[in-house]
Amino acid sequence: MENFKLIQPQERKWDPHPQLPGVEVAYLVSKRADKVDITCALVHLPVGSHVDKHLHENSDDIIYVLKGKAKMWVDGIGDVPLVAGTFLRIPKGTMHQPHDIEEDFIAHDTWYPALA
């Protein structure tokens, strides 16, 4: 079947995040690998990791927290608590920063339209 993709947990490949030292990412689907207009990944932030303020110019950042405890600073909103089950959509062009990683943190992160 065209475009069908399955990744079992034991097949998941964690890689260092390309811009964020200490952060890991496991891409599930991407424009580059799968030729689709969405990027989905698992993002792992260990306790104490640091992420600079940043924005995604052309993509909404859509986050669903799977485990852990942290905060997300969002420009114009302030700090948002993140715990398992939290859903957050950050519109494209909005400065944001995950911080205060209190518990090992994993989120399902979707960028739409896809990151390059």
Image: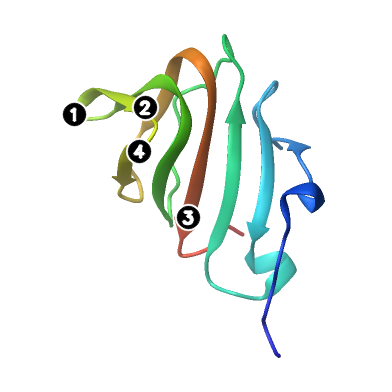
Q: Are marks 3 and 4 in contact (CB under 8 Å)?
A: no
Identify the amino acid type marked 1. Answer: Ile
Alpha carbons under labels 1 and 4: distance apart: 20 Å
SS at badge 3: strand
Alpha carbons under labels 1 and 3: distance apart: 20 Å
Nearer the observer, 73 or 15 = 15
Can you give x and y, in whole percent of width and height, for residue 74 in the image?
A: 29, 30
When the figure is inspected, residue 65 is found, relative to residue 10, above or below; the finding is: above
Answer with mark 3 or mark 2, whichever residue precedes in sequence: 2
Label 1 sits on residue: 77
Label 3 sits on residue: 111
Give the mark toward the camera: 3 or 2. Answer: 2
Identify the amino acid type marked 4. Answer: Gly
Q: Are marks 1 and 4 in contact (CB under 8 Å)?
A: no
Label 4 sits on residue: 85
Q: Are marks 2 and 4 in contact (CB under 8 Å)?
A: yes
